[in-house]
Amino acid sequence: MSPQKVLVLCTGNSCRSVMAEALINHLCAGKYTACSAGSNPAGYVHPESLVTLARHGIDAGAPVSQSWDEFAGEHFDLVITVCDNAAGEVCPAYLGSVPKLHWSTPDPAAVQGSEAEIRAAFDRAFLQLKQRIESELC
C-alpha cells in the first residue's frame, strides 16, 4: 500500500509548515508522505527552521516556500493547517472534502529577542509539531 499524501498549510510556508513536512516525512515514512504550501508564501524558507530541523537530526530535504496553487489538481488524503490564519482561510476548491486537521502552532518567526530566545521559540514549535505528529499520525 502506498503512503497517504498529506498537505501541510500555513500562510507564509516558511517555518511551521516546512518543519511539519520534514517531521512527517521522517517520522511517518512509509505511512505518509508530506509536502507543504502557503496561501501567501513568503518566498523563502526561514533559515532557523532548517537549523532547528538539523539540530534535532531531521533531514529537511530541499524545501521551498510555495503557493498552495502549485498543488491544484493533486489528490491529498489529509490536509493539516498549522497556523490560525491559514485555518480561517477558505481552502482551495481543489481540496474538496479532504479530511482536515488544525494544529494551532505559535509562529516562531514572530518572536523577537536574543538568538537564544529565537532558537527557543523554534524549538518549542518543533517539539509541539513533533508531539502532534507522533500522537495523531504515526
Image: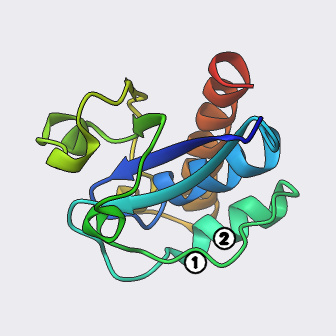
Residue farthest along the right direction in this orientation: 57
Question: In the image, residue 40 lies at what x, y percent?
Answer: 21, 67
10 Å neighbourhood of mark 2: few (<14), some, or many (≥20)?
many
Kind of residue at badge 2: Leu
Q: Is residue 81 left or right of residue 93?
A: right
Residue drawn at the location 58% of the way across and 74% of the way down: 63
Q: Is residue 65 above or below residue 12?
A: below
| Circle 2: element type | helix
Q: Quadrant of the N terminus?
A: top right
Residue holding disc 2: 50
Q: Quadrant of the C terminus?
A: top right
Question: In the image, residue 21 lies at what x, y percent?
Answer: 59, 53
Check contact, mark 1 vs mark 2: CB within 8 A.
yes
Calculate the distance from the C-alpha at mark 1 to the C-alpha at mark 2: 5 Å
Write down the quadrant of residue 83 in the picture: top left
Residue drawn at the location 46% of the way across and 63% of the way down: 113
Given residues 93 and 15, the one toward you in this image is: 93
Residue drawn at the location 60% of the way across and 70% of the way down: 48
Residue farthest along the top direction in this orientation: 135
Residue farthest along the front direction in this orientation: 1
Residue holding disc 1: 47
